[in-house]
Image (cartoon, rainbow, N blue to C red):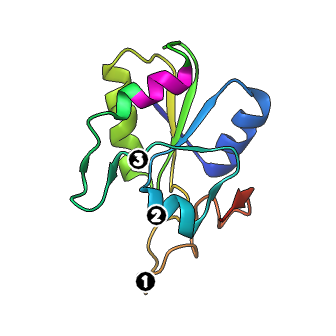
Amino acid sequence: MQHLSPTDANALLAQSPETLFIDCRSEMEYLFVGHPKGAHNVPWNDGPDWEVNPHFVQMVKKLAGQASARPVLLICRSGNRSSAAARALEGAGFSNVQYVLHGFEGDLDAQRHRNTLNGWRHDGLPWEQY
């Protein structure tokens, strides 16, 4: 498993359009906070109980077309969930899994705010909100 800066992850997506881009945040985060353009939402965990999604790997396999060698790039809010999700995919046989360091919203600053230090959105990379 490899982690990439948001800028490097965006470059990977441009260079390798076959890469499957998964946003593993909750559905509400994906819809209301925004998400990277082109990312599929497959929650690693979701409300109301916030338990790990037992269907996560199967959902990614379906999107990947059963090609475990297809590159997969994961993103979450800060990099924690995507790291755990990447380990699960590797354990299920995926051989080319990467995740975005600092995630979509980035690390907390001294005032406990996100989007001020790093992350996909902070770096000005393409994103959208419904």
Residues at marks 1 and 2, CA–CA distance in whole angstroms: 26 Å
- Residue 40: image quadrant is top right
Residue visible at 30% across and 60% down in the picture? 47
Which residue was labeled with disc 1? 110
| 63 within the magenta span | yes
Please, what secondary structure does the residue beneath circle 1 have?
Answer: loop
Amino acid under disc 1: Ala
Residue 109 spot, x, y in % from top left: 46, 78
Sooner in the amino-acid sequence: mark 3 or mark 1: 3
Residue extending farthest to the right is 14
Within 10 Å of the Cα at label 1, are there few (<14), some (14-19), or many (20+) other Cα atoms? few
Sooner in the amino-acid sequence: mark 1 or mark 2: 2
Sooner in the amino-acid sequence: mark 2 or mark 3: 2
User: Are the residues at dot 1 and dot 2 in contact (C-beta closer than 8 Å)?
Assistant: no
Q: Which mark is residue 7?
A: none
Q: Main secondary structure of the magenta part?
A: helix
Residue visible at 71% across and 35% down in the picture? 13
Which residue was labeled with disc 2? 28
Residue visible at 26% across and 62% down in the picture? 48
The span shown in magenta is 59-64
Please, what secondary structure does the residue beneath circle 3 have?
Answer: loop
Q: Residue 43 carries which label?
A: 3
Q: In this view, does 5 lie to the left or right of 109?
A: right
For the N terminus, give its image quadrant: top left
Report whether residue 77 is seen.
Answer: no
Amino acid under disc 2: Met
Residue 39 spot, x, y in % from top left: 62, 44
Q: Is residue 117 left or right of residue 125?
A: left
Q: In this view, does 67 lie above or below 74?
A: above
| 68 within the magenta span | no
